[in-house]
Image: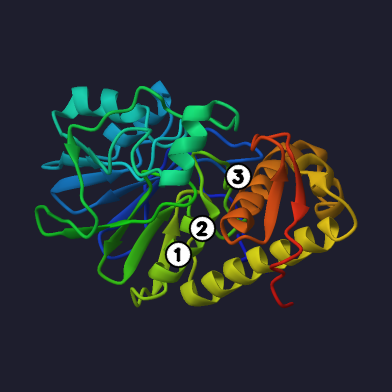
């Protein structure tokens, strides 16, 4: 189930989405960003800008041009430290004087197992990470940010990235790259953690949101249906991976060729990282085990003494 996305919105033009939220599409379309990054403006006078996007002068100009008479930027919020979401924050802050708020730098929020894998240097990853990102103010899980006529609650939702936040504004939740309508999210260890991803999806389901506003693609008008599909999709991938390992130990790359047979070649590297995330999750559940050292190109085998029922 992929949500209907319709026609791409115009680049660089602020579109009113209701509830004092506007969206500006950045000029960075790609196989991984779809139409481009969605930057959101919240409020009517002193505004919050969420996910300024890539370090692009044209997009900076579009954000500043969206400010009408009497409007200014008071807060800059970042969902996570990927190069298509966070780099423009520093320049926008320099232009407006607004502080940058996020869960932490690019290393913040990693689970213990992902921290160990990152320190080992054997897991790869690092796709598009804004390694120099550092917020002015660190947000805690559940923290509320109050502005001029608006209030935003920050929910720590790791999985796609360790420092990932989702932002709740009334009945709308800005989900960054955790939940998107056009595709499932990339989960690439050690920056991404599938165990955390599934837990964060379940948490979003408790927020009673009426719509999700993702970092890429159109708004999601049936949030819980989308969450159910994402969780079921991941469970289906898990079952397919275990079925492949029933035949013989395999690497993530070998499993990807079998499980993602219909995926375009340009997306197979991302698919391979998703498979690796599944294997690490299954390893933590004692369903698979690495053959030798745990690393990105290791073979994995079924743990014969502890098979999940399917």
Which residue position is annotated with label 1? 199
**Looking at the image, is 78 positioned above or below residue 287?**
above
Which residue occupies 82% across, 56% down?
245
Frontmost residue, 112 versus 58? 112
**Left or right: where 101 falls relative to 219:** left
Snapshot quadrant of residue 288: bottom right
Which residue occupies 72% across, 59% down?
303
Which residue position is annotated with label 2? 195
| 3D distance between C-alphas at marks 3 and 2 | 25 Å
Colour treatment of the image? rainbow
**Left or right: where 133 falls relative to 192:** left
Which residue occupies 49% across, 48% down?
160
Snapshot quadrant of residue 239: bottom right
Residue 296: which numbered mark, if any? Answer: none
| 3D distance between C-alphas at marks 1 and 3 | 25 Å
Q: Residues within 10 Å of mark 3 (few under 14, many from 20)?
A: some
| 3D distance between C-alphas at marks 1 and 2 | 6 Å
């Amino acid at each position: 189930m992929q949500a209907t996305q319709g026609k791409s919105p115009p680049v660089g033009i602020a579109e009113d989405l209701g509830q004092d939220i506007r969206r500006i599409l950045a000029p960075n379309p790609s196989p991984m960003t779809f139409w481009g990054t969605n930057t959101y403006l919240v409020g009517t006078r002193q505004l919050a800008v969420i996910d300024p996007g890539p370090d692009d002068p044209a997009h900076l100009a579009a954000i500043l041009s969206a400010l009408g008479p009497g409007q200014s930027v008071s807060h800059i919020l970042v969902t996570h430290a990927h190069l298509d979401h966070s780099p423009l924050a520093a320049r926008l802050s320099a232009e407006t004087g607004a502080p940058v708020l996020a869960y932490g730098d690019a290393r913040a929020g990693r689970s213990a197992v992902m921290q160990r894998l990152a320190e080992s240097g054997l897991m790869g990853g690092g796709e598009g990470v804004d390694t120099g990102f550092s917020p002015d103010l660190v947000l805690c899980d559940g923290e509320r940010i109050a502005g001029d006529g608006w209030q935003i609650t920050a929910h720590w939702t790791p999985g796609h990235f360790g420092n990932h936040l989702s932002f709740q504004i009334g009945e709308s939740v800005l989900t960054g790259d955790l939940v998107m309508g056009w595709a499932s999210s990339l989960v690439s260890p050690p920056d991404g953690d599938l165990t955390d991803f599934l837990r964060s999806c379940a948490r979003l389901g408790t927020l009673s949101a009426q719509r999700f506003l993702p970092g890429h693609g159109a708004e999601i008008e049936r949030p819980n249906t989308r969450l159910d599909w994402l969780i079921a999709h991941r469970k289906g991938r898990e079952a397919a991976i275990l079925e492949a390992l029933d035949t013989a130990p395999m690497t993530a790359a070998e499993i990807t060729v079998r499980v993602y047979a219909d995926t375009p070649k340009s997306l197979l590297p991302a698919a391979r990282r998703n498979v690796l995330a599944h294997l690490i999750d299954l390893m933590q559940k004692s369903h698979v085990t690495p053959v030798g050292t745990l690393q990105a190109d290791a073979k994995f085998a079924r743990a014969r003494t502890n098979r999940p029922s399917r």
